[in-house]
Image (cartoon, grey):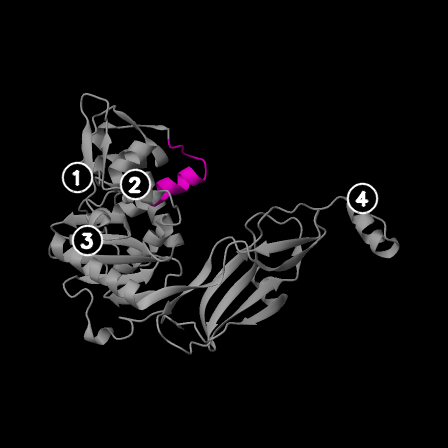
Amino acid sequence: MKKALIAGFLVLFVGLSSTAVPSYAEENSKTGEGSSQEELAPSARSAILLDADTGTIIYEKNSHDKLPPASITKIMTMLLTMEAIDAGRLQWTDKVRTSEYAASMGGSQIFLEPGEEMTVDEMLKGIAMASGNDASVAMAEKLAGSEQGFVKMMNDKAAELGMKDTHFVNCNGLPAENHYTSAHDIAVMSRELLKYEQITKYTGSYQDYLRKDSQKPFWLVNTNKLVRFYTGADGLKTGYTSEAKFCLSATAKRDGLRAVAVVMGAPDTKTRNNEVSRMFDYAFAQYTMHSIYKPGEVLGIVKVQKGNVPELSIQADRDYSVLVKKGVKDPDIRHEIQMDQNVKAPVSAGQVIGKLLVYQGDRLVKEFELTSPVEVKKAGFWKLFKRTTGKLFHVD
């Protein structure tokens, strides 16, 4: 498919005006422009700051060091849960039964009892807000039959996402040999989790209840205090063990820019929160998102050979944008649209049929896949016959 996309592309070039467009952020900048005078996370063992939409790195420090992640592990547990819900393999109202093994977890928990049942919705609250080790294992067993089977799913997903610094041993981050990840990889899986917009309903809530109408109501208070005290913060996950120290993968959104900041190995909660806040402050002060196409705008027309429709109108299914530095007058940003000229039916919904390439000067800074919005089936013989003869005899 990639060869076809390269060999048969029709290129539509559009130059963006450079009079009011800020410069694109450097893709792999260690600390961003001007940060040689400012260390954003001086006390953290490792850290990274990026924008969630494009993955552009604004700042990083020892971001590929392999370290124990503590309960930040649960980001992957939540990701696999959200994927299962999105795919229809799991419903929000499905009951999740607590095994004796799940109930035996120590550390942070929601005090599940053996045989107790909660809905997927309630379990996710317990994982996201209270960092429930017991709830994490219960969900793992629901999805894979055993924690061991679920851990295989976690590692498979990590490999799929290109998380080369990561190896999981359990689903909740309790101390275990050979259980590690990096700030970089945590940011990768955090971005992936944020694709499911419902997740911030859980990670962004400061307080809630479980078993509210029972004799044992359980008050949930989010372990991530930034969701209450930092404007725009709505996730994602804290972590602490004596080995990992204080860790946090946080996200905040302002003026269309969603940032992800990760710190690992901070000495205490206050330092952890201050350094994440400092990274957010820097991102929102120095950068903004520049829109290339807005949702619904037409990007181009693709002809479909032998399809029950002869062509597809490709529209932006979301805001295609890039991270840009504020205040730069001459960024030289342009973009190209490449559409496949050799599309043959059948075409599945979501099939890649083109690319949107964004450049700064001659440097490619972002590539977006363009996909078919609908399924296109093969046309029947009679429709193809009428289509062919209609061109000759105007037969409809």
In the rendered structure, the answer to whether residue 109 lies left or right of residue 350 reads left
Q: Which residue is mark 4?
A: 382
The amino acid type of the residue labelled 4 equals Trp
The answer to if 84 sits in the magenta stretch is yes
Q: Earlier in the sequence, mark 4 or mark 1?
A: 1
State the residue in front, 169 or 319: 319
Q: Residues within 10 Å of mark 3 (few under 14, many from 20)?
A: many
Q: CA distance from mark 1 to mark 3?
A: 15 Å
Q: CA distance from mark 4 to mark 1?
A: 66 Å
Q: Earlier in the sequence, mark 1 or mark 2?
A: 1
* Label 1 residue SS: loop
* Label 3 residue SS: strand
Start-end of magenta stretch: 78-92
The amino acid type of the residue labelled 3 equals Cys
**Residue 174 image offset from top left, x and y in percent:** 19, 44
Name the residue rendered at 12%, 54% in the picture. 270
Q: Which residue is mark 3?
A: 247
Task: Answer above or below: position of 187 versus 93.
Answer: below
Q: CA distance from mark 3 to mark 2?
A: 19 Å
Name the residue rendered at 47%, 57% in the picture. 319
Name the residue rendered at 20%, 26% in the picture. 113
Q: Quadrant of the N terminus?
A: bottom right
The amino acid type of the residue labelled 1 equals Ser
Q: CA distance from mark 1 to mark 2?
A: 17 Å
Marks 1, 2: nearer the viewer: 2
Marks 4, 2: nearer the viewer: 2
Q: Earlier in the sequence, mark 4 or mark 2?
A: 2
Let me know if residue 166 appears in the view.
no
Q: Which residue is mark 2?
A: 202
Name the residue rendered at 41%, 39% in the picture. 84
Q: Which mark is residue 108?
A: 1
State the residue in front, 22 or 128: 22
